[in-house]
Amino acid sequence: MFDKRFRKTIREFSMLRAGDRVAIGLSGGKDSCALLQSMVQLKEKLPMELVAITINEGIKGYREKTLKTAKRECEKHGVEHVVLDFKEAADMDLDEIVRTKKDDIPCSHCGVLRRYLLNKGSREAGANKLATGHNLDDVAQTVFMNIMRNEPARLARYLEPISQSSKFIQRIRPFMRTPEKEIAVYCMVNGIELDNMDCPYAGFAFRGQVRKILNETEEKYPGTKFKILNSFIEMEDALRAKYSVDAKLESCKSCGEPCSDGVCMFCKKVKLLK
Amino acid sequence: MIIMELILDNEKRELEYQGTIEQLLKQLKVMREEVVIKVNGELSAETTEVGSADKVEIIKVVFGG
């Protein structure tokens, strides 16, 4: 059932084709490890190359364990593994950023740096697709969060950028229809180690509150998360049509990566943090 | 008195209980969406009935980050 849904989602959204070179965002957590295993198994039927990319934010007491898991899973499956460090890319790791910018929500920095490195790292690894382990819960939370924050433009570009650039690696989310709990069960059945702690900065994130709301609602009204996802898929074309008019793409004056306005978010962040 | 062994948050305790896992989770105020259950070492659905001599493990699987 798990594999069936995974493969059906890939087919439904035409996520993969033979000959793809796919970067897998591998944090070492349960979702990305399950994704790695599922992609390795799929590769037997659909010829493609895989390379795993792990982003090391440098969160002490948290990231070291999952880095070890990521390395072990890559060795187990014989998949090439690339590790990219915040410290190397931005001169600061996340712990240092949090110490420096005490009033900021850590996730606001982490997300920008992580997405930048995943895109750039995937491209430099020669990948034409980037697969992440985002599951149904993640996607439903993101949709809900963007509605609650009145950010429909972000929703418009959630599944893929509105403006195309050869420097943007197409993102795919093969687990987007798979509930997070099912991924945990898959891991337990397949001997994949489960994460057992929150990111120490997770408590600052609005997402935690949204997760709680959705999980409470799902208990009372089963199927809520699927309905949120399906509603979003129905709305997506209209959102993209509305927000594509103003979307334009340039190259960052500082690093050359694609951006919408002169200097990319990553370079703006790095300048701000120094 | 129906005593079963319960493991929650890595802590073992004994509990007087007989009923489904789903009802147990409600009683303990544990969110069903965030945990996986093992009964006597086997993964089990929330509809499973448990009671005396059962060892129930409630494993948190959803974390932030």
Image (tube, coloured by chain):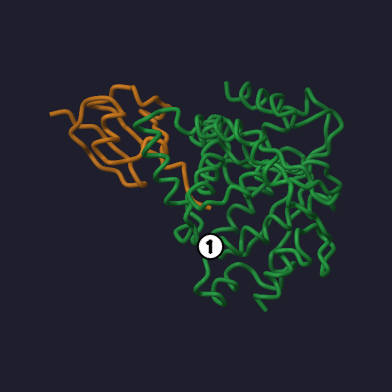
Chain colours: A green, B orange
Q: Is residue A255 left or right of residue B62?
A: right
The residue lying at 40 percent from left, 34 percent from top is: A218
Q: Is residue B60 left or right of residue A229?
A: left
Quarter of the image with the N terminus of chain A in it:
top right
Residue B48 position by quadrant: top left
**Badge 1, how many Cα within 10 Å: few under 14, some, many 20+?**
few
Q: Is residue A151 above or below residue A34?
A: below
Residue A254 position by quadrant: bottom right
Instruction: Please state the total of marks drawn on the protein image.
Output: 1
Q: Nearer the viewer, residue A156 or A177?
A: A156
Which type of secondary structure does the marked residue at label 1 adopt?
loop
- The residue labelled by disc 1 is A61
Instruction: Residue B1: give x, y in percent of width and height.
Output: 12, 29
- Chain at tag 1: A
Q: Nearer the viewer, residue A76 or A160?
A: A160
Instruction: Residue A174: give x, y in percent of width and height.
Output: 66, 33
Q: Is residue A53 above or below residue A78?
A: below
Instruction: Residue A132: give x, y in percent of width and height.
Output: 67, 42
Q: Is residue A253 left or right of residue A30?
A: right
The residue lying at 53 percent from left, 62 percent from top is: A61
Instruction: Residue A32: give x, y in percent of width and height.
Output: 63, 42
Q: Is residue B25 above or below residue A151?
A: above
Q: Is residue A112 above or below residue A42?
A: below
Q: Nearer the viewer, residue A26 or A170?
A: A170
Quarter of the image with the C terminus of chain A in it:
bottom right
Amino acid carrying label 1: it is: Gly
